[in-house]
Amino acid sequence: MTSIPLGQFIDIINKTRVSYAGTWIDSLKSGSMDAFAGLLIANLSKITSLKIGHNFINGDDILGNVLLSKVSGELPVFERLKKMSYIKRLDREVWERNQIFEYAASLFYIPTVTDMSVSMTNHPFMWPRGDPDLDCLTSLHIEWAIGSVVAEVLTLTPNLKSLSWRWIYHDSCNEELEFKILDFDQIVEVVSFVEDTLETLVLSMGVGDDDYDRLPVGMDVRGSFSGLSEFERLKELSIPMALGPSPYL
């Protein structure tokens, strides 16, 4: 079996001169897959598609910091990236692993991306580096985010054609990603930022980590989806059956 050239990897990390190089090297020596994944992605610049899943999204991790460095130009930037996926399941055992806003928000600064899938936590919203250029973004799948966060993104997407929005519900209202009020009028108001371009709209709800096919007991439902009738370009609409029957449409 060929041994891992650890010394060569350490040299590569040292040459990056990033502030977290020491932590990165320590993680590498301990056999952390997060550190190896960061090493793999650090120097990629020509790829057109990148998918980062649950096991590699853990809050303040090496891979997240590598992404920040690439977006800022501290490491080689993504020159041709078109499809980006950064999706995580909600971690109820270690809540800190869900604190991924900084890393998720940074991905919107990759100006070549046309298709974005992202889990977005609900911090008091502020773009970390000013408004990103989202003119190329035509398809967005966003999870966890409440309406005010989604609105901040949609106001900057003049060419968005497809939107998939999956929000979180749980019977405990003291967790920031979960809420008991389902306001259809608010949903329509948020989506109206892309009314002139939107062709496909998919709305879904999660309870914890699971898709849900009925309204949870205790959820306060308000408003209607009638405003969607004004979306002249809308061709495809997907809403859970629990949200569809009269009087909600």
Image (tube, grey):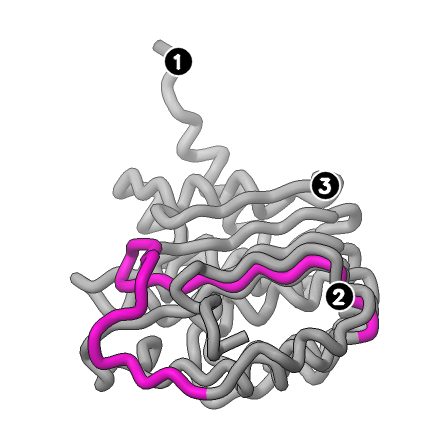
Q: Amino acid at mark 2?
A: Leu
Q: Secondary structure at mark 2?
A: loop
Q: CA distance from mark 3 to mark 2?
A: 24 Å
Q: Which circle, 1 or 2, is nearer the viewer?
A: 2
Q: State left or right for residue 69 relative to residue 53.
A: right
Question: Mark 3 — residue?
Answer: 48
Magenta residues (range): 196-222
Question: Mark 1 — residue?
Answer: 2
- Quarter of the image holding residue 172? bottom left
Q: Which circle, 3 or 2, is nearer the viewer?
A: 2
Answer few, some or many: residues within 10 Å of disc 3's Cα (few below 14, many 20 plus, some between 14 and 19): some
Question: Mark 2 — residue?
Answer: 198
Residue 106 x %, y %: 59, 68
Q: CA distance from mark 1 to mark 2?
A: 52 Å
Determine whether label 1 and label 2 are within 8 Å by CB: no
Image point 21% across, 74% down: which residue? 217
Question: Is 221 one of the magenta-colored residues?
Answer: yes
Q: Earlier in the sequence, mark 1 or mark 2?
A: 1
Residue 163 x %, y %: 64, 62
Q: Secondary structure at mark 1?
A: loop
Residue 15 x %, y %: 58, 50
Answer few, some or many: residues within 10 Å of disc 2's Cα (few below 14, many 20 plus, some between 14 and 19): many
Image point 81% across, 65% down: which residue? 233
Q: Nearer the viewer, residue 149 or 80?
A: 149
Q: CA distance from mark 3 to mark 1?
A: 30 Å
Note whether 22 is above or below 7 in the view shown.
below
Answer few, some or many: residues within 10 Å of disc 1's Cα (few below 14, many 20 plus, some between 14 and 19): few
Note whether 37 is above or below 78 in the view shown.
above
Residue 98: assigned label: none
Whether residue 155 is visible, yes or no, is yes
- Quarter of the image holding residue 237? bottom right
